[in-house]
Each structure stands twice: as structure tokens, then as C-alpha cells.
Image: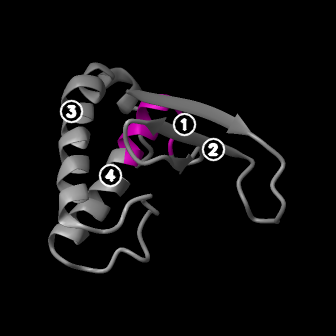
């Protein structure tokens, strides 16, 4: 399961974006910047890219403290499970949004 929501809210601090994408489902939840990802497909792609950095660092036993937060310990079993889900997202979901993904900013 995968869901993407667009949120507009009043942040408690300055320099915090008022608009974010929230990605949830059978995978770690995360928020994704709207400014760099102007539609839902790009938000999913951005999510996958950030989570892949986490997966790669865990599998290579590198630190993850400066990467997107993930709600599981940085252990290889979790990284491999997430890697499998990300592969499905890329092959089964993102592959169907070619037009929307063309809006990526250079």
C-alpha cells in the first residue's frame, strides 16, 4: 500500500515550508518537499530516491544520521525489505507516470 497526501499547514517556525507531500503506507512514512516535487508522482520518485540512500548506507554499513529518518533500526534486514518495496514502487507505480515525471526541475 502506498498513499501520497498534499498538506498545507501553518508551521511553528520560520523557514519551514507550508506545503509538503506526505508519503505513507506499508513502508516508512516521510514528508517530501513540494517546491522540488510539484506533483504526486515526483513526490513518490523523491521519496524513493531518499529511501534508496538510506538503504544503500545501511547495506554498506555507513552512517544514516544525516539521511531521511526511517522508523526502524538501520539493520540490513530492514534495508533489504525496504529495497524490495522500493523496487516494486519503481516498476509498478512510477513506470505508469512517465508524463508527470517529465516535470522534474533541472
Residue 37 in the image: x percent, y percent?
A: 50, 42
Magenta region includes residue 5: no
Q: In the structure shown, which secondary structural element does the residue marked by tag 1 occupy?
A: loop
The residue beneath circle 3 is 88
Please determine whether, in this image, residue 41 is positioned above or below residue 81. above
Residue in the image at 48% along x and 46% along y: 29
Q: CA distance from mark 4 to mark 2?
A: 16 Å
Quarter of the image for residue 96 reads top left
Residue mark closest to the camera, 4 vs 3? 3
Q: Which residues are magenta?
A: 37-47
N-terminal label among 4 and 3: 4
Relative image position of residue 27 (x, y in whole percent): 37, 42
**Circles 2 and 1 in contact, beta carbons < 8 Å:** no
Residue at 40% x, 37% y: name it: 44
Q: Which residue is mark 1?
A: 38
- Does the stretch in magenta take in 43? yes
Q: CA distance from mark 4 to mark 1?
A: 16 Å
Q: Residues within 10 Å of mark 4 (few under 14, many from 20)?
A: few
**Element on which disc 4 rests:** helix
**Colour mapping:** one colour
Q: Are marks 3 and 1 in contact (CB under 8 Å)?
A: no
Label 4 and label 3: CA atoms lie apart by 13 Å
In x, y percent, where is residue 67? 41, 69
Q: Residue at x 82, y 65 (%)?
A: 13
Q: Nearer the viewer, mark 3 or mark 1?
A: 3
Q: Closer to the observer: label 4 or label 1? A: 4
* Residue underneath mark 2: 20
- How far apart marks 2 and 1 lie (CA) works out to 10 Å
**Label 1 neighbour load within 10 Å: few <14, some 14-19, many 20+:** some
- Disc marking residue 49: 4
Amino acid at each position: 500500500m502506498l498513499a501520497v497526501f498534499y498538506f498545507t499547514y501553518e508551521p511553528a517556525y520560520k523557514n519551514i515550508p507550508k506545503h509538503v507531500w506526505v508519503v505513507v503506507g506499508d513502508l516508512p512514512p516521510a514528508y517530501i518537499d513540494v517546491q522540488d516535487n510539484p506533483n504526486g508522482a515526483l513526490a513518490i520518485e523523491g521519496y524513493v530516491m531518499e529511501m534508496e540512500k538510506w538503504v544503500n548506507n545501511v547495506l554498506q554499513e555507513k552512517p544514516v544520521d544525516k539521511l531521511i529518518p526511517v522508523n526502524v533500526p538501520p539493520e540490513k534486514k530492514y534495508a533489504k525489505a525496504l529495497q524490495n518495496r522500493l523496487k516494486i514502487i519503481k516498476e509498478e507505480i512510477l513506470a505508469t507516470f512517465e508524463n508527470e515525471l517529465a516535470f522534474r526541475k533541472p
